[in-house]
Amino acid sequence: MSKNAIFKITMLAGAVALAGCTDSIEDPVDPPVEPPEGDVLVVIDDGATASGMGLLVGHAPAYSKNALAKDETYTDDGFSVAPAANGDEYVWEVTTNSSHGESYFIVGGDTPMDMTEYANGVLLFDMSVTNATATGSTSHQIVMQTNGGATDYLDRNVFFFGQDLLATEESAGWKTFAVKLSCFNPDDAGNFDITNVHEIFRLDIRNEAVTYELGTVKYEADETMIPDGAVEWTCS
């Protein structure tokens, strides 16, 4: 076993309290996802986050981060995150409000993770988009974030995508989406540190009313590991 693998398994084995939470994370009803093995890092599976990680949700302008356990629901001002089902699989349903500048769904923890192994990999996530009217060039974000600087919200590695990509998939059912990490862009200040990642998956919907369901989320270390039939969102 490599030193990196030992580090990841040791780091993820402990329970971690998340920074900025309004409440502490409760123990989930079901066991959390097992730590990553080999070349795959599973972020969410069957509605549960990986060991040592938790789910935080919220929206602008308050920017509060509200911790959710697997069976919990959060609702506020037209924004909601709730448990749902896709057959036998537990998934999350998220509804955003167009009046909010940012509505976020975050998986991460206080203890940082070294994601160097996935720097040349691909992010894969299962999603069903049920509402996403095309309105123009609104730019949403998928984010990896380092919480180490004076302005944490700028310490990001970001993939930007438009509302049109979601609108194309509206009512198309469940699909696997793929984004290569080579398509992510670090912040201009150079503060993102892939060896020190706190938010390993953050989906931000901005200024749009969108409803989506999110299932399994994972990183593959090899960017060629995109399953047949997946929708690949490419570099702009």
Image (cartoon, rainbow, N blue to C red):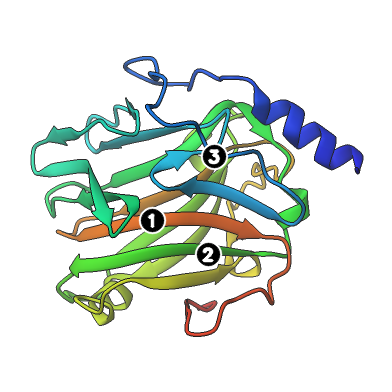
Is 172 situated left or right of 23 in this image?
left
Residue designated by label 3? 33
Please name the residue shown 80% across and 32% down the image: 7
Q: Are marks 2 and 1 in contact (CB under 8 Å)?
A: no
Circle 3: residue type: Val
Q: Earlier in the sequence, mark 2 or mark 1?
A: 2
Is 30 situated left or right of 22 in this image?
right
Q: Secondary structure at mark 2?
A: strand
Q: Earlier in the sequence, mark 3 or mark 2?
A: 3
Please name the residue shown 46% across and 62% down the image: 125
Q: Quadrant of residue 205?
A: bottom left
Is 64 situated left or right of 32 in this image?
left
Residue designated by label 2? 124
Q: Earlier in the sequence, mark 3 or mark 1?
A: 3
Q: Residue furthest right?
A: 2
Category of crowding for the residue at label 2, using alpha-carbon neighbours closer than 10 angstroms: few (below 14), some (14–19), many (at least 20): many
Residue designated by label 1? 215
Please name the residue shown 41% across and 64% down the image: 126
Counting from the top left corner in percent of width and height, residue 91 is at: 32, 51
Front one among 71 and 101: 71
Circle 2: residue type: Leu
Circle 1: residue type: Gly
Category of crowding for the residue at label 1, using alpha-carbon neighbours closer than 10 angstroms: few (below 14), some (14–19), many (at least 20): many
Q: Is residue 151 visible?
A: no
